[in-house]
Amino acid sequence: MRYRGYPIEQLAEKCSFLEVAYLVLFGELPTEPELKEWTDKITYHTMLHESTKKSLEGFRHDAHPMGMFISTVAALSTIYPDARNVLDPEVRKLQIYRLIGKVPTIAAYCYRHSLGFPYVYPDNDLSYTENFMNMLWRMVGPMYQANSALARALDILFILHADHEQNCSANMMRSAGSSQADPFVATAAAALSGPLHGGASKEVLKMLDEIGSKDRIPAYIEQIKAGHGKLMGFGHRIYKNYDPRARIIKWAADQVFQVTGRNPKLDIALELERIALEDEYFIKRKLYPNVDFYSGIIYQAMGFDPAMFTVLFAIPRTVGWLAQWQEMIMDPEQKIARPRQIYIGHNVRDFVSIEKR
């Protein structure tokens, strides 16, 4: 897996998320002055308009975070009508700053709303992930001090999720954006929803809970081989070997658990992975761990409710969506999306009055 030619392993080890975001959007890693300007621009646009904050308050306390996230991102279209001028390069760039800056704020506000806590304004003195964590978890009293290991792990997770080929949501971003809709409504259309796209990490946790303990793994695997259920977090539409992101995220999990304490689910996951990788049934079918196998365990250890997982996914994926959208807008051959339809119904028929049907 590579972003603009750079192996994902090198980027995850040596870059910040915003550095990788610049690469994905503009094709090259930034110089030091370019990164400073880019970071300053993103940081400047982290605040939400007060009317947007008030619209969040209209949701029920138990509203799903992704539904709130989608609705709020779409609402930004009404706050920034200049975004409709998508053919102007400077206007496009401004919306990119706005979206990348605001999606962590929206996600944090959705989380706080579900708990009934007051919203925490962005702090421009903090890094991208530290600011997000501060908006999530700061309570009354001194400023929340983000643990550096957790902040770095979250940065790595964001890097791994920034873009991933023509997946369902990237395809939606291009399709919705092909009408020259502004990027806020196109992002809302693309945003992850549904268990088949972005929901696998939550399903992995459910599977690990169902297994319950390491001694029950062999029986569970035999059940899967007999055709009863699926081994969640294994296999991928693209990768026919070990998902390269899974190796990195497994390392990140070790760093997180040194801070949070070891989650019992990790021991089950490690043993499940070991047995599955040695079983001819899974080897023959090229079913190897993917990025979702460990990400849910990390998010849960950091304190996130599974309902928030897709929103956490959407924050970095906004970068990939915007890169796809910008590429599509700049393509002189791009036309409005209209997939070919092959009609397989009745041929021409004469109308029959209702009393004769």
Image (cartoon, grey):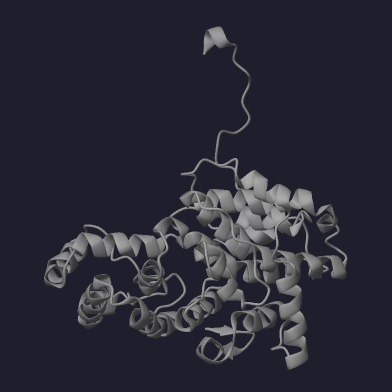
Residue 342, above or below 39: above
Task: Name the residue: 44% across, 77% down.
Answer: 239
Q: Report the side of 238 relative to 105 (left or right).
A: left
**Residue 186 location (% of width, % of height):** 69, 56
Considering depth in this image, is 63 or 276 the residue closer to the camera? 63
Residue 162 placement, left or right of 43: left
In the rendered image, the residue lying farthest to the top is: 355
Q: Residue furthest front?
A: 141
Residue at coordinates 37% horizontally, 80% vertically from top-left? 259
**Residue sitting at 80 percent across and 70 percent down?**
93
- Residue 3: image x %, image y %? 60, 83
Residue closer to the observer: 197 or 211:
211
Q: Residue 225, percent across and down?
A: 20, 66
Q: Quadrant of residue 254?
A: bottom left
Q: Position of residue 208 (x, y in %)?
A: 25, 65
Q: Can residue 273 be spotted in the picture?
A: yes
Q: Is residue 357 left or right of residue 127?
A: left
User: Does the image show residue 337?
Assistant: no
Is 101 on the left or on the right of 135, as rendered? right
How many numbered dots are placed on residues in this image? 0
Q: Nearer the viewer, residue 262 or 230?
A: 262
Q: Image quarter for residue 323?
A: bottom right
Relative to residue 193, is residue 158 depicted above or below? Answer: below
